């Protein structure tokens, strides 16, 4: 009896799914995409209705012959690529290359790699959804049109090596708009007054709230003088409680994670970059070796914009919560969350643990530190979402004195509810905490201990961090779950922005490119226009719109803008800023340049002299610090250097000697043993695994790095 062939995207899934389906199936990986547009040519035939010209990717040339042979011998070929448009597109390309036809090639999808989900998917094979494929084709062609038509123009008008993108350029535009808002910002002064009052030996604070039944606005006191008049009236006045209003406040849990909310919380709570979050989530989804249990997918599919949850998972979570915390922590009815995103794929689920009763502590020994932290975050958020509200007792107290009203507020947690599992982050705790108030009742007289006027200034809007940028992109409908991490990585790699103290700063290059695009291609960088394009792509996916028409509607005006820009866009150049600083090596004058890590002084005699000195945000030199360490290779003194957020020891004999060492948080040199070869094979590429030692201890890493980045924690 002929075996069936099941094709997945990654080698990790081969092992996980192979254990589930057994001997009647051959499981093979396509290692991601097998075809794409060519890298060194446009690859789109505009005259023939934007027909894409696909080429087999170099890595796939080794895989395709084996897949072709296996497909020929198989009774049925199941295409089990990822549960999104990208996965549908890969399935379609495989079907075309392997010439499967509509009968032999069958598409199956699943949102988690568990026995029940895989077996259920096998019961419902379907044809490839051409509408989803068309949406992916349209996105790819649009991105190619913008990238391959705009980038050469930037090479000609700004400098070679630059790129523009349909979505990345909008992200840079958002960051530049925020930078312009900060530059235009003028701080406004205002004053507040706090009274420190005593009752029964306990001192508490109350803020000046209003006068004569009217509430003060934020800028009621723009200067100190009017407030001093109020202080004069209040000194010696009687402070009496006029009202005490107790209330119950309930706080509901947040819904389970979508891709965007996972990236935001992982950034805030774990300080993970968006790309790191998605890499680790992919590992948890595809399968982790859990000892005797074998490879197990720990979370559901991590590219989703839906907050729906399977009833079976809800039931298991509720049982676990009741057993662990008691019946009062389980709401009367299972919580149902509605997706706010109008184009969310409701057939998908939220990101959740595949087995809710599998606690993070149970699998800790099998996970790397990053895998454990992310699984714990996903597990806690999901479980909290199925728990009862947190209940607070709040107290609002109004206090009268000389016609003025002061207000004090207190809050105490009566019932933790979901907070027992998913508490506030440190930032949230500082915002939520309020000191307890003494027992107070209307008519109580209070003793005034101090009146404290305070000067404040309004602050400019904050620069975006990764969490807030993802949130803004999502709110505006720019990009989709799978694109947020690549967008951010691209604008960093291109040097259009830099990350400093976890905040984005547009570089001079980023500002210049943004201005050129804004002046000559306003639609390409317009937030609203880009969101409309995303809506059109969604309509293509639901077979409501023709993909060629969408591209043509974009292409016609875009070409006119391109022709106009070729003639009118001025040639610009980022010139280094001249300084009077002399190079410590060759005494030539130095200039200020900028890269993705920040501004720095560079010798004008480059490339003959490559001396550079980093500058801080205020333009002051960050000089290497002398140390007592000697270079083990040449004997010269080691210097403590700084590059961006990284500190390290480097030989003072650079560039002749390039010896460097990592340092710990106290600046002590970290000497790690050399990698050791092991007998264990990488499950992704088959190469030997190396035993390495990192800052979090020993781990296994594929010897095929950087092509293969597979790592595994060594079980304790």
Image (cartoon, rainbow, N blue to C red):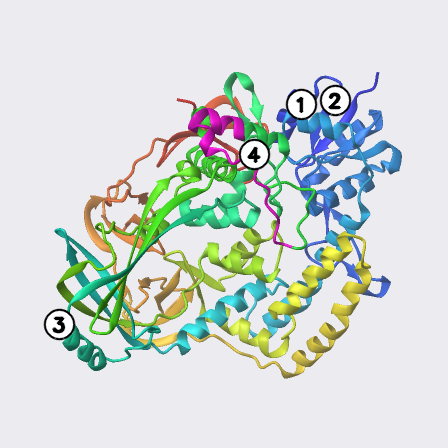
Q: Decide which of tag 1 and tag 4 comes sooner along the chain.
A: 1
Residue at 20% x, 73% y is 402
Q: Residue furthest bottom?
A: 568
52 to the left or right of 188 = right
* Tag nearer the camera, 1 or 4: 4
Q: Callout 3 environment at 10 Å: few (<14), some (14 to 19), or many (20+)? A: few
Q: Decide which of tag 1 and tag 2 comes sooner along the chain.
A: 1
Q: Callout 4 environment at 10 Å: few (<14), some (14 to 19), or many (20+)? A: many
Vertical placement of 303 versus 226: above or below? above
Residue at 61% x, 38% y is 309
**Quadrant location of residue 589?**
bottom left
Q: Do residues under tags 2 and 3 come within 8 Å of each other at their CB atoms?
A: no
Distance in Å between CA atoms under marks 4 and 3: 62 Å
* Tag nearer the camera, 4 or 3: 3
Q: Which residues are magenta?
A: 318-341
Query: Which of 111/16 is in front?
Result: 111
Regarding residue 671, the answer to whether it shows in the image is: yes
Vertical placement of 186 versus 378: above or below? below
Q: Do residues under tags 1 and 2 come within 8 Å of each other at their CB atoms?
A: yes
Instruction: Indicate the position of residue 52 as horizontal and vertical percent values.
Output: 79, 56
Query: Which of 490/680 is in front?
Result: 490
Distance in Å between CA atoms under marks 3 and 1: 80 Å
Q: Secondary structure at mark 2?
A: strand
* Tag nearer the camera, 2 or 4: 4
Label 2 sits on residue = 25
Label 4 sits on residue = 299
Q: Decide which of tag 4 and tag 3 comes sooner along the chain.
A: 3
Query: Which of 506/710 is in front?
Result: 506
Label 1 sits on residue = 18
Vertical placement of 413 versus 239: above or below? above
Distance in Å between CA atoms under marks 2 and 4: 24 Å
Instruction: Indicate the position of residue 483 as horizontal and vertical percent values.
Output: 60, 53
């Amino acid at each position: 009896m002929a075996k069936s062939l099941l094709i997945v995207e990654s080698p990790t899934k081969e092992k996980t799914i192979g254990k589930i389906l057994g001997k009647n199936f051959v499981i093979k990986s396509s290692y991601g995409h097998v075809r794409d547009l060519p890298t060194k040519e446009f690859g789109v035939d505009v005259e023939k209705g934007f027909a894409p010209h696909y080429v087999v990717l170099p890595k796939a040339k080794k895989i395709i012959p084996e897949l072709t042979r296996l497909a020929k011998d198989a009774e049925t070929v199941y295409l089990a690529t990822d549960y999104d448009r990208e996965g549908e597109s890969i399935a379609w390309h495989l079907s075309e290359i392997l010439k499967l036809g509509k009968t032999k090639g069958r598409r199956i999808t699943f949102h988690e790699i568990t026995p029940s989900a895989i077996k259920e998917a096998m019961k419902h094979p379907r044809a490839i959804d051409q509408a989803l494929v068309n949406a992916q084709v349209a996105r790819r062609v649009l991105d190619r049109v913008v990238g391959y038509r705009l980038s050469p123009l930037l090479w000609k008008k700004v400098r070679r090596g630059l790129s523009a993108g349909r979505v990345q350029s909008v992200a840079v535009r958002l960051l530049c708009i925020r930078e312009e808002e900060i530059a235009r910002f003028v701080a406004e002064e205002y004053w507040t007054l706090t009274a420190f009052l005593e009752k029964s030996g306990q001192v508490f604070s109350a803020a000046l709230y209003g006068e004569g039944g009217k509430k003060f606005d934020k800028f009621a006191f723009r200067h100190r003088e009017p407030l001093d008049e109020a202080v004069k009236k209040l000194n010696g006045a009687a402070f009496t409680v006029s009202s005490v209003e107790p209330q119950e406040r309930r706080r509901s849990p947040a819904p389970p994670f979508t891709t965007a909310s996972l990236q935001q919380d992982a950034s805030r709570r774990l300080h993970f970059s968006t790309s790191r979050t998605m890499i680790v989530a992919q590992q948890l989804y595809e399968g982790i070796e859990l000892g005797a249990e074998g490879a197990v997918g720990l979370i559901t599919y991590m590219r989703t914009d839906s907050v729906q949850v399977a009833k079976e998972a809800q039931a298991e979570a509720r049982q676990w919560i009741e057993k662990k915390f008691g019946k009062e922590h389980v709401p009367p009815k299972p919580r149902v969350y509605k997706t706010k995103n109008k184009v969310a794929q409701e057939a998908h689920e939220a990101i959740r643990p595949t087995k809710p009763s599998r606690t993070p502590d149970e699998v800790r020994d099998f996970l790397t530190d990053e895998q454990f932290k992310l699984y714990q975050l996903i597990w806690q958020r999901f479980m909290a979402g199925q728990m009862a509200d947190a209940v607070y007792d709040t107290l609002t107290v109004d206090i009268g004195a000389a016609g003025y009203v002061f207000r004090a507020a207190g809050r105490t947690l009566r019932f933790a509810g979901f907070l027992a599992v998913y508490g506030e982050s440190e930032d949230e705790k500082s915002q939520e905490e309020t000191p307890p108030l003494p027992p107070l009742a209307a008519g109580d007289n209070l003793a005034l201990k101090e009146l404290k006027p305070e000067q404040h200034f309004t602050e400019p809007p904050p620069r975006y961090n990764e969490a807030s940028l993802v949130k803004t992109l999502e709110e505006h409908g720019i990009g989709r779950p799978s694109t947020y991490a690549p967008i951010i990585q691209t604008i960093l790699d291109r040097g259009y922005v830099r990350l400093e103290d976890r905040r984005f700063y547009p570089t001079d290059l980023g500002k210049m490119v943004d201005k050129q695009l804004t002046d000559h291609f306003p639609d390409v960088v317009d937030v609203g226009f880009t969101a409309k394009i995303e809506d059109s792509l969604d309509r293509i996916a639901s077979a409501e719109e023709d993909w060629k028409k969408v591209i043509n509607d974009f292409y016609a005006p875009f070409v006119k803008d391109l022709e106009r820009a070729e003639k009118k866009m001025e040639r610009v150049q980022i010139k280094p800023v001249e300084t009077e600083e002399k190079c410590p090596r060759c005494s030539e004058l130095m200039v200020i340049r900028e890269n993705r890590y920040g501004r720095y002084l560079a010798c004008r005699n480059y490339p003959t002299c490559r001396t550079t000195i980093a500058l801080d945000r205020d333009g002051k030199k960050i000089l290497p610090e002398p140390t007592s360490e000697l270079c083990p290779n040449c004997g010269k003194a080691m210097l403590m250097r700084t590059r961006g957020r990284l500190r390290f020891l480097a030989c003072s004999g650079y560039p002749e000697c390039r010896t460097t060492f990592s340092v710990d948080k106290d600046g002590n040199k970290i000497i790690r043993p050399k990698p050791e070869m092991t007998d264990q094979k990488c499950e992704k590429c088959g190469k030997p695994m190396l035993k390495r030692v990192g800052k979090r201890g020993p781990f296994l890493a594929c010897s095929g790095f950087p092509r293969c980045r597979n790592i595994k924690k060594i079980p304790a």
